[in-house]
Amino acid sequence: PPSAPPAPPPSAPPSASPCKGTAEEAALRAAATEVAPDAGGELADGEGARLGKEAPPLELDLLALYFTALKVLFVSGCLPAASALVRLLEPARRQIRDLHLTLIRNENAYYCCAAMLLATPPPQPADPPLAPLYVAGDSHALSPSWRVVRWRGQPRVLAPVLVTGLKLWHLRDGADFFPKANFEAAAASLPDGADVVFAFGEIDCREGLLLAVERARYRDLAQAIDTVVDIYIRTLRRLAARRRFNILVHPVPPVLPETRAVVKQFNAALRRAVERASPVLAWLDFFEQLLTPAGDALADGLALDGTHLNPQ
């Protein structure tokens, strides 16, 4: 609802996974490798599974709670425990088909994404922990989570700062929709001077921009994109000024064939805006590498579940 109260600030994201490996970690992670996507991006169903619409509401509610628990464990870096939970949940989840058509479709989507990512787990946590390079984003922040990259000559762990369901349109002045409060709480949880990759905009490209043009709120797609990009850039510039964040802007991933043309146009406008805001903001210049040479499909090896990128 428009008047939803602000979310309480979460605890500060960890500088690295707080859940140290144990002697059982390999076995727990191995359990997640049993999870494999089918051609449609859903996890495989068990033989004789019921339709989701036939499942009792209480069963679906319980599954939603457990799916959310996995999401929390994954984002918190508790990967061994997350893998163990996948092993426990899979027999129950496989008995209900078409969960993506039920009221718990969002919880199911996050569960499926996290479970698939656990099937290709990141390296063991470093000891001592590596300094974080935070990745603030919608569900696309999950794919790079807990991987190690080199930035400015130093190894850094990619620590997720998840803001579920945020459209850039939600960040406009005067908006009071819940995702904006969640974004502000997530940003407040980061330390001053943090290095942060911002990865938003995919939801706008998927379900916001074209609809707004169809409803004649803009004269064309270019004007709609420019409006949303301007909101994004102003938000990031304020954070850079007030919090001294070192901000890197991630291109919108071109995963969905249906929205790829919109994503290309959006990223071109976003890149120009980020470059005009340099050196306050910096553009991560690898969008073309996410596509085939012809630019008409996702590059080989980058598909995960039909919606998110494969971190490998």
Image (cartoon, grey):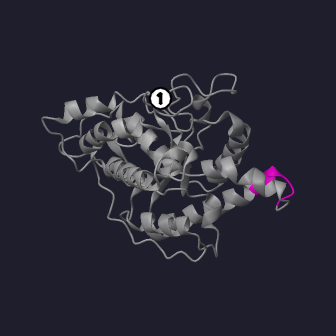
Residue 256 position within the rendered picture, expressed as x and y whole percent measured from the top left: 64, 36
User: Eyeballing the image, is 169 above or below 282?
Assistant: below
Residue 30 position within the rendered picture, expressed as x and y whole percent measured from the top left: 27, 29
Considering the image in quadrants, where does the N terminus appear?
Answer: bottom right
Q: Residue 226, located in which quarter of the rendered image?
A: bottom right
Residue 289 position within the rendered picture, expressed as x and y whole percent measured from the top left: 58, 29
User: Eyeballing the image, is 212 above or below 180?
Assistant: above
- Mark 1 residue type: Pro
Magenta residues, start to end: 218-224
State left or right for residue 225 relative to residue 122: right
- Asked whether residue 143 appears in the rendered view, the answer is no
Q: Residue at x 48, y 71 (%)?
A: 242
Q: Residue 125, located in which quarter of the rendered image?
A: top left
The one nearer the camera, 146 or 153, is 146
State left or right for residue 266 relative to residue 300: right
Task: Identify the element where label 1 is drawn.
Answer: loop
Crowd tier of the residue under label 1, counting other residues whose Cα lies within 10 Å: few below 14, some 14–19, many 20 or above: some
User: Eyeballing the image, is 258 above or below 202?
Assistant: above
The one nearer the camera, 232 or 35, is 35
Residue 111 position within the rendered picture, expressed as x and y whole percent measured from the top left: 42, 44
To which residue does mark 1 refer? 37
State left or right for residue 264 relative to residue 124: right
User: Eyeballing the image, is 255 above or below 168?
Assistant: above
Q: Residue at x 26, y 45 (%)?
A: 130
